[in-house]
Amino acid sequence: MSEHFTLIGIDGGATKVSAWLVKHNPSDDTFSLTGEHAQMSYSKIKGFIPDFKPLAVPQQLQERDEKNIKLTEAEIQQGNTFTESCARVIETLVSKLNDKPILVGIGMPGLKTEDRRGICVLANGPRIINYASCIEERLQAKNIRFAAPIAHIGSDADYCGIGEMYARDGSFRDISNAYYLGGGTGTADALRLRGKLVPFDQTNHWLAKTWELKNDLGKSLERYASASGLQFIYSEKCGIAVDQLNRQKIFPPQIANRAVQGEKAAIATFKETSKYLALLLFERISTLYCGTQNLFEFVNPKRDALDQEHPYRLEVFHRLVIGQRMADLLKTRSGKEVLAKPIVKQLSRLIDKSTCLLEKTKKHYLHGKQFREELLVLSPLREAPALGAGIDAYLVYTGGT
């Protein structure tokens, strides 16, 4: 089927957009990236507003609920830079290829419009209610043909799960239950339960997304589970602004190196990060098996409380998967020393001392009193969101989902 079109997966973020060619492997019905890709920062596009300020989220939600979305001039201008960036990366890829029509899947943050082809609520960027239509019209004007219209704009979290499920080296393959935590600019949560992908939007009555959870220091767990959040924690402790850290190219791997070398601020950063990442993973384990233990508060105090009862109680995870830039960090020598090892140590203690997990369940996760490290997997799919976006477009087009 895929020989009739070129499959493209798009990962749109807060600052840039990336496009990858996706390949279907008919022999085992898996997918992979071909290596051909293009990337563009929104700031490269004429008209980009560096100090763009979105409307307050409550106002965005109110306009959505009242079906009366009023885009500001600034939103329209900034939105045009987003869609132009996306169109250009697709155009760059197509210019290297043959004349086949394209099939495009797109992942973007934010709440989607009713037809799921636009963005109607976005905390850190412009609302773009006609996102998909803009891309189609822009590319069709360049005589680029579509095999089918863009079906919908998906979420990067869901696309991480799809990528892990269908990629040849995906960490959700060949198991029943797995949890995925991807950490880049933000966090992405994904689940496979009883062999099927379960979007977090369907679990919100019993399991919350990482960014929704707040620790006893008043910080969102996203601060500890994302590369940009970890950099923010370090910024607080060393007194250097994040912008300055970026200019000096001091990112999580460099912060880990500083911790190994004995720098106090870096050591404190990873001590705090490992504590709350271990607690987050334990929260996932205990909530799946026992129902919520209310280990965290919510960032939004008005959020509905979690139900302790849910359809998957008494289940266990066969894998806990860490992905994206946090996985890259944990693979480094310094990252293993200052983050991976402390997480495993603290997670082992939390499981061993748990009062809600039965002994047989503890034995699933522990060898003696030590966490079974084979259950903690670092995903090799650095570009899982783009891969998942392409796979989703393929499955929708072929009737696979």
Image (cartoon, grey):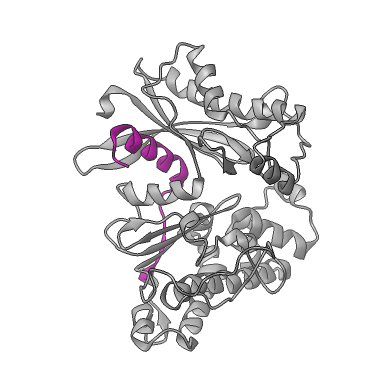
Q: Please indicate whether residue 113 sits to the left or right of residue 19 in the image.
A: right
Residue 40 or residue 70, whichever sits in front: 70
Image height of 278 relative to 387, above or below:
below
Q: On the picture, is 261 further left or further right than 31?
A: right
Q: Quadrant of residue 368?
A: bottom left
Using the rendered image of the protein, determine whether residue 205 is visible from the camera's viewpoint.
Answer: yes
Look at the image and tell me in which quarter the C terminus lies: top left
Give the image location of residue 323, x and y in percent: 47, 55
The quadrant holding residue 235 is: bottom right
Q: Residue at x 68, y 31 (%)?
A: 43
Identify the residue shown where x is 61% and y is 61%: 212
Residue extent of the magenta highlight? 374-401
Q: Quadrant of the N terminus?
A: top left
Residue 88 at what x, y percent from top left?
55, 23
Residue 100 in the image: x percent, y percent? 34, 18
Q: Quadrant of the rendered structure where residue 126 is?
A: top right
The answer to whether residue 90 is magenta is no
Q: How many marks?
A: 0
Magenta stretch, main secondary structure, is helix
Quick check: can you spot residue 257? no
In the rendered image, the vertical position of residue 325 relative to residue 94, given as above or below: below
Q: Residue at 47% across / 60% down in the picture?
A: 331
**Residue at the right extreme?**
239
Residue 386 belongs to magenta span: yes
- Residue 102 higher or lower than 18, as above or below: above
Q: Name the residue furthest front.
A: 66
Q: Residue at x 45, y 49 (%)?
A: 158
Of the pair 277 and 64, the residue shown nearer to us: 64
68 left or right of 191?
right
Residue 265 in picture, x, y percent from top left: 73, 67
Nearest to the observer: residue 305 or residue 276: 305
